[in-house]
């Protein structure tokens, strides 16, 4: 029987192309279904706003919310507020990652650090982030530093606990094998603990991102800050529920964009790297 490597490669390439085309079709169908369900939900929402027992200014429909969103955009209020909030969020979230990941890895591998800081970290994680705001105002006054402090305090411990869980769940045989090959100290962290705990670190980063958003909105609602939280507060002061919903839609859209462009691709890459992709 003759061996034909070129023909075999062509068949493999054809199978891969067919699988890729099928995956694209399935993704398209799923996207269309989701869009259809979204339209249905928007229609139901609008009908409830029309026929509900409450006035439209109390429960506006998507048409009124879209008009309010357009008004915020054309008036020049929305984009500066988005930019300022995202800048604060990025700085605070970056600080949370820089502190939380090393802290969590130390909690997971160092007995003394775990005995000293384990219980306080676990207890403080259950503390709502808004409770840090009075402390931040007393320490830093009405300033950007107060907002950043609340963002960091609200998200850093979630990142740390996820990192700790990821390090604790590493297969001990990997650590023994690395030590047999001469890895020790910080080299062990960079070659074993950090790469092997990547899925847990990514989950913690995603959780920390959501906590940072909540903390930021809580801080911006309290005093004039020029961010999305201030737009929410102005909507409350004006009894303008449409404006409040419009800002909430903006925050939701930002979250979806970050999920699709940042966390989604990262999660897909991690699943492929660790062989947990079921596609």
Image: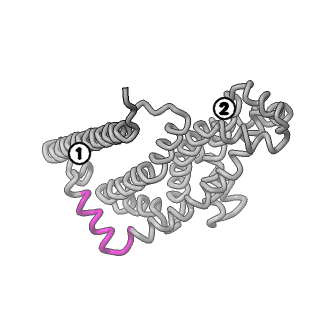
For the N terminus, the quadrant is top left
Decide if residue 265 is on the left or right side of residue 145: left
Picture disc at residue 238: none
Q: How is the image coloured?
A: one colour
Mark 2 nearby-residue class (10 Å; few <14, some 14–19, many ≥20): some
Residue 178 place in picture, x, y as percent? 78, 34
Q: Is residue 201 left or right of residue 213?
A: right
Give the spatial CA distance, label 1 vs label 2. Answer: 37 Å
Q: Quadrant of residue 257?
A: bottom left
Q: Is residue 102 left or right of residue 180?
A: left
Q: Residues within 10 Å of mark 1 (few under 14, many from 20)?
A: few
Residue under pointer 1: 35
Where does the image place residue 133, in percent across and percent down from the top left?
A: 62, 52
User: What's drawn in magenta, residue-wise?
Assistant: 65-78
State which tag comes first along the sequence, 1 or 2. Answer: 1
Q: Is residue 6 visible?
A: yes
SS assignment at label 2: helix
Which residue is depicted at the point 13% across and 43% down?
A: 51
Q: Main secondary structure of the magenta part?
A: helix
Q: Secondary structure at mark 1?
A: helix
The structure residue drawn at horizontal position 27% and vertical position 63%, both measured from the top left corner, is 68
Which residue is tagged 2?
A: 165
Q: Nearer the viewer, residue 104 or 171?
A: 171
Indicate the position of residue 239 as horizontal and vertical percent values. 33, 58
| Residue 72 located within the stretch drawn in magenta | yes
- Locate residue 44, reporting x and y percent: 18, 41
Q: Using the rendered view, name the quadrant where residue 233 is placed.
A: bottom left
Asked whether the viewer can see residue 125, the reply is no
Q: Is residue 17 left or right of residue 115?
A: left
């Amino acid at each position: 029987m003759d061996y034909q490597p070129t023909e075999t490669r062509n068949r493999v390439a054809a199978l891969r192309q067919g699988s890729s085309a099928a995956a694209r079709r399935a993704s398209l169908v799923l996207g269309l279904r989701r869009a259809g369900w979204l339209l249905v939900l928007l229609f139901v929402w609008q009908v409830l706003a029309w026929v509900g027992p409450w006035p439209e200014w109390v429960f506006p429909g998507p048409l009124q919310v879209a008009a309010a969103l357009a008004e915020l955009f054309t008036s020049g209020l929305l984009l500066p507020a988005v930019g300022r909030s995202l800048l604060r969020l990025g700085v605070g979230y970056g600080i949370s990652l820089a502190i939380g990941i090393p802290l969590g890895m130390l909690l997971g591998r160092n007995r003394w650090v775990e005995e000293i800081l384990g219980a306080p970290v676990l207890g403080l994680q259950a503390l709502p982030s808004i409770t840090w705001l009075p402390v931040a105002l007393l320490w830093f006054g009405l300033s950007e530093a107060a907002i950043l402090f609340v963002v960091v305090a609200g998200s850093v411990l979630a990142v740390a606990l996820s990192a700790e869980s990821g390090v604790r769940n590493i297969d001990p045989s990997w650590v023994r094998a690395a030590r047999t090959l001469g890895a020790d100290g910080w080299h062990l962290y960079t070659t074993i603990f950090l790469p092997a705990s990547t899925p847990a670190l990514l989950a913690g980063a995603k959780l920390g991102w959501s906590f940072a958003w909540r903390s930021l909105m809580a801080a911006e609602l309290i005093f004039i800050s020029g961010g999305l939280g201030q737009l929410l507060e102005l909507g409350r002061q004006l009894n303008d529920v449409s404006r409040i919903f419009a800002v909430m839609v903006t925050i939701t859209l930002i979250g979806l964009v970050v999920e699709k462009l940042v966390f989604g691709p990262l999660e897909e890459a991690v699943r492929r790297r660790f062989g947990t992709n079921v596609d």
